[in-house]
Image (spheres, helix red, strand yellow):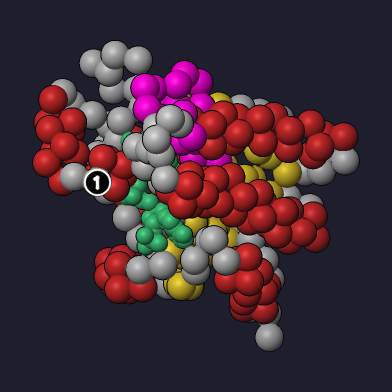
Amino acid sequence: MVEKSSQKVALITGASSGIGEAIAHKLADENYRLVLCARRQEKLAKLTEKLKEKNSGILTLKVDLRQEADILNMFNTVRNQWGGVDVLINNAGLGHKEPLMTGETEAWREMLEVNVLALCICTREAIKDMSDRNQGHIIHISSMSGHRVPLSSGVYAASKYAVKALTEGLRQELREANKNIKISSISPGFVETEFAEKYNNSKEKAQALYSSFPVLKPQDIANAVSYILSQPDYVQIHDILLRPTQQKS
Ligand SMILES: NC(=O)c1ccc[n+]([C@@H]2O[C@H](COP(=O)([O-])OP(=O)(O)OC[C@H]3O[C@@H](n4cnc5c(N)ncnc54)[C@H](OP(=O)(O)O)[C@@H]3O)[C@@H](O)[C@H]2O)c1
């Protein structure tokens, strides 16, 4: 049976660490019911323990975003339990430093499947719910790499340039269809998360990057999410670009 509540439902992909985890804290503070998904269940369980004090409505789901069946099951579970989602934060993503001249195909495939294809599938499924509810907001966590191309990051940047096109493409489709659904994007520079360790395949390189100057904190991105969601109906933020003050490009 679908539980009725005035609390909005926000689904955050990649909530097990970094930016997604910070957004979960922020939206729990703002009284959303949360759907948190990722592959690492133990991390989601720890996060749920911390969030319990703030918010009773938390659903955690083990989802591998490279598996479409996992994504469809997740949306069906949310529909059955809470009637669907009001807010979708397409946050999950990753980078591998795998250059165009020498990179591994599997690393390229993972970036494109998670950063682009899964984001499209989640968006389509969320829009079904939002159309039924006649309201909704989708926020893509993109990157400064959707605005310029760092050396050896061609495929990661391509995935985030795709997110840029998908943001504008969806804006146009939603407007054409006269839907009461907004689409926004956030494009961060360096943020201290697990991202750089995975990107460089090295804890030391990640630590060196994050200690070279003050980089953004995941909470800075969560604050941008909150700002976007707090706008009146007629204001649609398109993209927020934010870098650490000392970041070069
Ligand atoms: N950190 C930065 O400097 C930076 C800058 C610009 C943009 N971004 C973007 O910010 C977003 C969040 O990254 P982050 O910095 O917070 O990195 P992070 O700490 O590594 O978090 C990445 C999240 O994505 C999830 N994820 C990855 N592959 C997945 C899969 N196949 N299925 C389900 N979940 C998956 C991870 O969960 P599991 O591993 O538990 O599945 C994790 O929760 C990404 O889109 C990234 O491109 C980051």
Q: Residue at x 12, y 33 (%)?
A: 208
Where's the N terminus, which quadrant? bottom right
In the foreground, 65 or 19: 65
The residue sitting at the bottom extreme is 1
Q: Position of residue 83 (x, y in %)?
A: 68, 71
The residue wearing badge 1 is 201
Question: Can residue 206 be spotted in the picture?
Answer: yes
Where's the C terminus, which quadrant? top left
Label 1 packing within 10 angstroms: few (<14), some (14-19), many (20+): few
In the foreground, 77 or 106: 106
Q: Amino acid at mark 1?
A: Asn
Q: Residue at x 60, y 34 (%)?
A: 162
Q: Is residue 212 magenta?
A: no
Q: Position of residue 231 (x, y in %)?
A: 58, 33
Vertical arrangement, residue 240 with respect to residue 104, above or below: above
Question: Can residue 87 be spotted in the picture?
Answer: no
Q: Which quadrant of the figure has residue 243?
A: top left
Q: Is residue 151 magenta?
A: yes
Q: Position of residue 130 (x, y in %)?
A: 73, 55
Q: Residue at x 59, y 54 (%)?
A: 118
Which span of residues is magenta-colored? 140-156
* Horizontal arrangement in the rendering, residue 21 relative to residue 147 (left or right): left
Counting the numbered discs, the total is 1
Q: Residue at x 49, y 66 (%)?
A: 64
The residue sitting at the front extreme is 102
* Horizontal arrangement in the rendering, residue 51 relative to residue 28 (left or right): left
